């Protein structure tokens, strides 16, 4: 009996131990959730309180373009030659300024690529025996305040490397403007002032230097320069890390609020746009390059996306009719993936000076022919006329015409080489032929040939007004 009681007691003890262990497992607290990812894409959505442990990584991601402007002219000499420039547009990470405008950037020439034989022949016919070579540049050092140097690896975007100007849209003729329109105009003026301040750091050559450069460029053999003010889009091959910051409940709550009417955002195109290849309805994306603030509230962080499309397009045509484009952004995508419908209009854009871009009040962009084409063509026609006129009163025995008329014809057709031929070869018909060639080429190029295409390379900076409906666009001309 005692033995059976002992076995029964041991059995009850085992049952009690197993039961207690099971209850402990079931009542144990659930394992803590994985720590919040520091990446912005995992931040809390609106309506969810951000805990004190949530942080935002202040990183300039791979592929971000640093807009580098050369502050002095560069005479091309050799591969490995140093290149010096400055940041033209400030760089942000989420809502923090991490690279201010004016920061020094240095690099070097990595390749000098010669021109093709066909182009070399054409340039030689135009008295240019040293045609411009293609220059490849890489920037590898960024200097911040306090002489802090950050090594960078970059790749220059194709299509950049031009002297840039800041073009604003024309004023809308709508009478009395509402508060949103006035706010948009103020933002446009402020952006123009910012660009002017950047250009003050560029040491542009004086008038005499420009005259000398022009004269040297007319010689058959001449050095190659890159002008001060030339802008390169240098895309980062590796991200830049600037630490992190807390994600406060205030920031989390304000991010998904609609942009106030009249707000302006700075964006960069993510793809190349050209009036020659674009099609109506083609998708166009841009990334917000600066955070949008409403007072002290963050509305849009850097890295938000704008999605849109080509609304109208007109390629360049004969008789110097230039290319035109009109784009419209209609959807905003925040870094957490939330999408919002928006109404926008193009306020300002950076473009190459050679395109002479003009923006209308509806946000349409058009390339314009330079006004100097009239002067250039007039000079060519005048030189040809002098060559044809000759000198009927010539008394020096040169029946082919005087030296002045032959020289004028040569200058109009073949620059310095033509002048030399006109002086040395006593042939009035030759001078006339060279003058006629120069005049006809000038007339064809400036008034008969196809006009200029409108091109915005990848990473072109734009300013977009949000929250205001643009007027219905009229037809392109």
Image (spheres, helix red, strand yellow):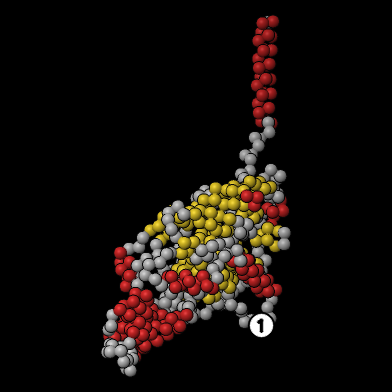
User: Which residue position holds label 1?
Assistant: 175
Please tell me which residue is depicted at 66% across the width and 82% down the height of the picture.
Answer: 175
Residue 251 x/y as whole percent: 69, 54
Residue at far front of view: 396
Residue placed most toward the observer, 332 or 58: 58
Residue at far bottom of view: 393
Q: Is 41 placed above or below 332 here?
A: above
Residue 424 x/y as whole percent: 30, 78
Q: Is residue 210 visible?
A: yes
Please tell me which residue is depicted at 54% across the width and 73% down the height of the picture.
Answer: 207
| In this picture, residue 454 sits left or right of residue 240 | left
Please tell me which residue is depicted at 66% across the width and 24% down the height of the picture.
Answer: 21
Say which quadrant the N terminus sits in.
Answer: top right
Please tell me which residue is depicted at 65% across the width and 54% down the height of the picture.
Answer: 96
Residue 176 x/y as whole percent: 68, 81
Residue at far top of view: 2
Q: Secondary structure under badge 1?
A: loop
Residue placed most toward the observer, 53 or 96: 96
Looking at the rendered structure, the number of numbered marks drawn on it comes to 1
């Amino acid at each position: 009996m005692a033995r059976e009681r002992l076995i029964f007691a041991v059995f009850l003890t085992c049952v009690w131990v197993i039961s207690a262990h099971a209850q402990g497992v079931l009542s144990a607290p659930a394992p803590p959730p994985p720590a919040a990812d520091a990446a912005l894409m995992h931040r809390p959505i609106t309506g969810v309180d951000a805990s004190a442990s949530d942080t935002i990584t202040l990183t300039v991601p791979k592929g971000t373009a640093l807009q580098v402007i050369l502050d002095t002219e560069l005479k091309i000499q050799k591969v490995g030659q140093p290149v010096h420039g400055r940041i033209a547009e400030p760089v942000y990470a989420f809502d923090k300024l991490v690279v201010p405008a004016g920061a020094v950037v240095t690099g070097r020439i990595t390749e000098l690529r010669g021109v093709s034989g066909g182009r070399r022949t054409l340039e030689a016919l135009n008295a240019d025996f040293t045609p411009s070579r293609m220059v490849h540049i890489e920037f590898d050092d960024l200097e911040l305040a306090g002489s802090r140097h950050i090594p960078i690896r970059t790749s220059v975007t194709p299509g950049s490397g031009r002297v840039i100007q800041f073009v604003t849209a024309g004023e809308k003729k709508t009478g009395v403007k509402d508060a949103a329109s006035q706010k948009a105009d103020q933002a446009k003026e402020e952006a123009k002032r910012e660009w002017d301040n950047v250009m003050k750091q560029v040491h542009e050559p004086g008038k005499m230097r420009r005259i000398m450069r022009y004269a040297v460029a007319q010689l058959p053999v001449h050095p190659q320069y890159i002008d001060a003010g030339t802008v390169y889009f240098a895309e980062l091959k590796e991200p830049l890390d600037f630490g992190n910051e807390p994600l406060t409940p205030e920031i989390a709550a304000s991010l998904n609020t609609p942009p106030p009417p009249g707000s302006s955002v700075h964006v960069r195109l993510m793809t190349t746009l050209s009036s020659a290849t674009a099609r109506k309805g083609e998708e166009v994306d841009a990334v917000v390059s600066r955070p949008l603030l409403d007072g002290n509230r963050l509305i849009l962080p850097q890295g938000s996306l704008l999605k849109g499309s080509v609304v109208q397009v007109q390629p360049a045509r004969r008789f110097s009719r230039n290319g035109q484009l009109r784009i419209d952004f209609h959807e905003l995508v925040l870094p957490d993936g939330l999408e919002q419908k928006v109404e926008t209009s193009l306020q300002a854009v950076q473009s190459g000076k050679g395109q002479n871009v003009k923006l209308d009040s509806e946000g349409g962009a058009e390339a314009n022919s330079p006004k100097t084409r009239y002067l250039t063509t007039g000079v060519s026609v005048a030189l040809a006329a002098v060559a044809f006129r000759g000198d009927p009163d010539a008394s020096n025995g040169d029946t082919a015409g005087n030296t002045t008329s032959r020289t004028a014809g040569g200058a109009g057709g073949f620059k310095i080489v033509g002048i030399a031929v006109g002086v040395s070869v006593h042939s009035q018909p030759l001078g006339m032929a060279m003058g006629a060639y120069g005049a006809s080429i000038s007339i064809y190029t400036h008034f008969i040939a196809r006009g200029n295409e409108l091109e915005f390379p990848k990473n072109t900076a734009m300013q977009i007004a949000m929250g205001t409906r643009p007027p219905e666009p009229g037809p392109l001309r």
